[in-house]
Image (spheres, helix red, strand yellow):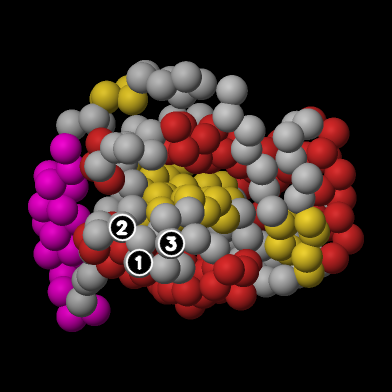
Amino acid sequence: MTRRSISTIRDPQENRAVQMAVVLRNQFATLDPKPLAMRVQDALAFSDDHDSVVLSLDTIEHTRATLAARLPSMRVTWQIAGKGPGGVGATHIALQGTLCPGDAKSERSVSLLLSTLDGMSRAASSRELTSPDPVTAAVLTPLRTAASRLTAVHLEEKEREPWDLSGGPLSVLFGQRPCPLIAVQGNRQEKYSQQTALALESAGELPVNTIITRGLSGSHV
């Protein structure tokens, strides 16, 4: 049996890194991580070229900055959940993606999606979203779980090509089932019918992918 270890845990909030180190030591006897107060963007400089990185950051801005700071040879999986305007009846979604080395198409799609969302949304902590609204708390928790489950599946699929990943390299979740997502650049001067045609054309490029993985519902895309 190969012994594996994590040398450090880096988190900008010092106490949170310490608490996570304690949890890992209690659960995994081979781990002895050293907690450090450090932003994940800064921590990437101390990572190995071919490390796999999992991000679950507080804001879209931080997610964008970290993805931009990653090394070209790194494989980075990220996820974020939130809600739209409208109170109890607002739309609740989760986004999950995995950027693999050399996958320029997914990189462009993720960059366009996150920059657009960053410009039209307001950062809010989980406590702010869920404390006054039990409906949001009840909806976001399973969404986060579904996104985390897909992230775990992608970690198991490390040797796969980007479009062979379960659900594809970028997914949106409105419930337990992930749906593949491609962000395309539109034009404000285009009519709605033209934008729809462009979206459908891009969707037609998606390969048919049957999702049958542990913890995920089977579906055809």
Locate residue 173 relative to residue 146 in the image: left or right: left
**Residues under numbered marks 2 and 3 in contact, where contact means CB atoms less than 8 Å apart:** no
Residue 108: image x %, image y %?
28, 67
Q: Is residue 73 above or below residue 205?
A: below
Q: Which residue is mark 3?
A: 49
Q: Is residue 71 above or below residue 96?
A: below
The C terminus: image quadrant: top left
Q: Residue at x 86, y 50 (%)?
A: 19
Q: State yes or no: discs 1 and 2 in contact (Cβ < 8 Å).
A: yes
Residue type at numbered disc 3: Asp
Q: Is residue 169 visible?
A: yes
Task: Give the structural element (helix, strand or loop) at label 3.
Answer: loop
Q: Is residue 144 above or below residue 13?
A: above
Main secondary structure along the magenta-highlighted residues: helix
Q: Quadrant of residue 125?
A: bottom right
Callout 2 environment at 10 Å: few (<14), some (14 to 19), or many (20+)? Answer: some
Where in the figure is residue 22, as x and y percent of width and height? 86, 44
Disc 1: which residue = 72
Region rendered in magenta: 188-207
Q: Label 2: which residue?
A: 101
Q: Residue at x 12, y 64 (%)?
A: 194
- Mark 1 residue type: Pro
Depth check: give the residue in front, 70 or 128. 70
Q: Is residue 174 magenta?
A: no
Between 110 and 4, the residue placed more toward the observer is: 4
The image quarter containing residue 62 is bottom right
